[in-house]
Amino acid sequence: MNNNLRCALAAAQLTTTDVAAALAVDPKTVSRWLNGRIPYPRHRWAVADLLSIDEADLWPEIAPRHQALADGIQAVYPHRWAVPQTAWRNLLNGARQEIGILAYSALFLAEDSAALRILTERAEAGVQVRILLGDPEGPEVAARGADEGIGAEVMAARVMNALTLYQALLDVQGVEIRLHHTVLYNSIYRADEQLLVNTHAYATPAANAPVMHLTHTDNQGPASTYLASFNRIWTTARPHSE
């Protein structure tokens, strides 16, 4: 019997039929989860997102899988779309000093109204927010569009859409957006000492590429490499204000 899941569903006022409909599974499958069966990872992540709760709180027995794989490496997700929304929001919410975003467009975050609200709230609380996006007129953005098979114009349009959505953040003190001319081998999402690093692969959209959850423990750990990369790109990028 999974009492954690049962209590979470009751608190959210959701029935097994509601969950089944949201996840496109049979209600009997949800009943089996309530009776103690552990779902496949994709279903655990979907249920956790639906309930806005960490999957380890619903299935404590899987917690050991989230222990550090190596020094500073907390978890590896097979795809960016497999990272639960709660993980992104918890990352941003946990920042007390600095948030950093390095990508070509990071459009998926810009389209998340909850993420934008959190960025605004963190900045208003004194957290420095630095956003680095690709220059939509630059050859690097065009090349990435070609690599992904969506074309230069579509990729540039994604960046422009993201800039439009992030624009409101510029009215908040402590937020700065810059445009870079860098060939990215990964996108970096940083909140203090926690990072989600989305690797890039040729001919593969970033959403389909793996994501590493890293913790910056010391200057020899893997996270320090990505933090140094972020800072180098920041110093060469140009400010965006309109």
Image (cartoon, helix red, strand yellow):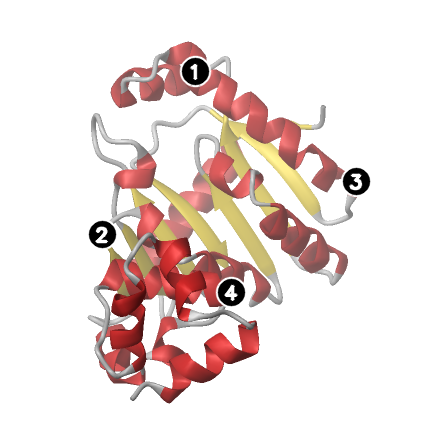
Viewer-closest of 142 and 82: 82
Q: Residue visible at 65% across and 27% down?
A: 164
Closer to the N terminus: mark 4 or mark 1? 4
Closer to the N terminus: mark 3 or mark 1? 1
Residue type at mark 3? Asp
Quarter holding residue 2? bottom left
Is 98 rendered above or below residue 142? below
Instruction: Read off the residue under disc 3.
Output: 171
Q: Are marks 3 and 1 in contact (CB under 8 Å)?
A: no
Instruction: Read off the residue under disc 4.
Output: 90
Residue 154 is labelled as 1
Residue 87 % position (x, y): 44, 62
Judge the density around disc 2: few (<14), some (14-19), many (≥20) Cα neighbours within 10 Å: some
Residue type at mark 2? Pro
Per the model, the C-alpha gap separating discs 2 and 1 is: 25 Å
SS for callout 4 = helix
Instruction: Read off the residue under disc 2.
Output: 78
Viewer-closest of 2 and 212: 2
Which of the two marks, 4 or 3, is nearer to us in this view? Answer: 4
Closer to the N terminus: mark 2 or mark 1? 2
Quadrant in the picture for the C terminus: top right
Closer to the N terminus: mark 2 or mark 3? 2
Residue type at mark 4? Asn
The count of marks equals 4
